[in-house]
Amino acid sequence: MRHYSRTLPLLCAAYICGALSACKNVPEGIIEPDTMAQLLADLHTGEAVVDANRRNYPQERDRAALKEAIYDKYGVSGEEVDSSLAWYGRNIRKYVEVCDKSIEILEHRMIESGNRLAAANALAVSGDSVDIWPYPRFIHVSPRGATRSLTFNFSHDENWDSGDIYTWRAKFANTSGTTNWGIVTEYADGKTETLHASFAGDGWQEITFFTDTVQPAARIYGYLTLSGKNADDAFIDSMGIVRKRFNETLYSQHYRQRKLKNIEGRLHPAVQVDGPSDDSEK
């Protein structure tokens, strides 16, 4: 009995150490999956901040300092991050799990950020320059999803003016083929203006629409479609639509938009403005 009483604690300790090692699932010196997912999400967010504020980060050393600050937050070094990425690259299943977790973190952050920004914009949409995008800023387009398109639709309110300018802007990553997008504006007199564009590749892209200076728009809507040939995940970051007031020095751009007339000169019922209809006057 005395022999078992001495060896039992040692066996228990060995078992616990083995269990902890099994739970860890990564070698010594490799950053844990959950921590790695958080770290990658922070690095992606930091890169987005740098790209959106190049005046504040003009030098490479400024960007490197931001990255080092993120490393310090998790108590790791650049060498540890590099060796961890190399290990995950050799263990694809673990790497995919980390990437999926990192994407979930980013999507959650963007949804929260978009909700806060939309709430703030609701209090200040009457400004001369304001981002009116009310939806999530970060969008993950999966090949397993039902669609590779997104749309927006805004109806007229008291803050809209004639000649307003709308710039739709976002940063694209891991796209392939051609991306098509466009903005359509309908007016109370039944006229419609459209602007369509396409681009290939990643990075920042934008499309700018100039509304008529004679009358404010009744409705503005748009679409974006990624190439259906892409079998990989695509990402859209920092999505936004900035509305600015009329600028006479830029108004010549208005003439590149296509002008159409609705059938019978009427608005679609979805954009009918207040007031008596043609039928009610007969």
Image: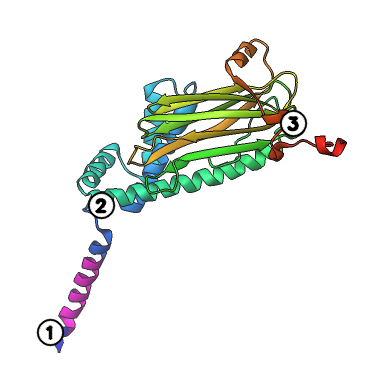
Q: Secondary structure at mark 3?
A: loop
Of 149 and 105, which appears nearest the observer? Answer: 149
The image quadrant that residue 219 belongs to is top right
Find the distance from the CA under tag 1 to the CA under tag 2: 45 Å
Q: Are marks 2 and 3 in contact (CB under 8 Å)?
A: no
Report whether 268 appears left or right of 43: right
N-terminal-most mark, 1 or 2: 1
The image quadrant that residue 14 belongs to is bottom left
Q: Position of residue 241 (x, y in %)?
A: 58, 31
Q: Which residues are magenta?
A: 5-19
Tag shown at residue 93: 2
Looking at the rendered structure, the kind of residue marked 2 is Arg
Packing grade of label 1 (10 A; few <14, some 14-19, many >=20) is few
Residue at 73%, 26% in the rendered image: 216
Q: Residue furthest bottom?
A: 1
Q: Which residue is mark 3?
A: 159
Q: Position of residue 155 (x, y in %)?
A: 69, 36
Q: Are marks 1 and 2 in contact (CB under 8 Å)?
A: no
Of 16 and 133, which appears nearest the observer? Answer: 133
Q: Main secondary structure of the magenta part?
A: helix
Q: Which residue is mark 1?
A: 3
- Image vertical order of residue 30 relative to residue 22, above or below: above
Looking at the rendered structure, the kind of residue marked 3 is Asn
Report whether 104 appears left or right of 251: left
Q: Secondary structure at mark 1?
A: helix
Find the distance from the CA under tag 2 to the CA under tag 3: 51 Å
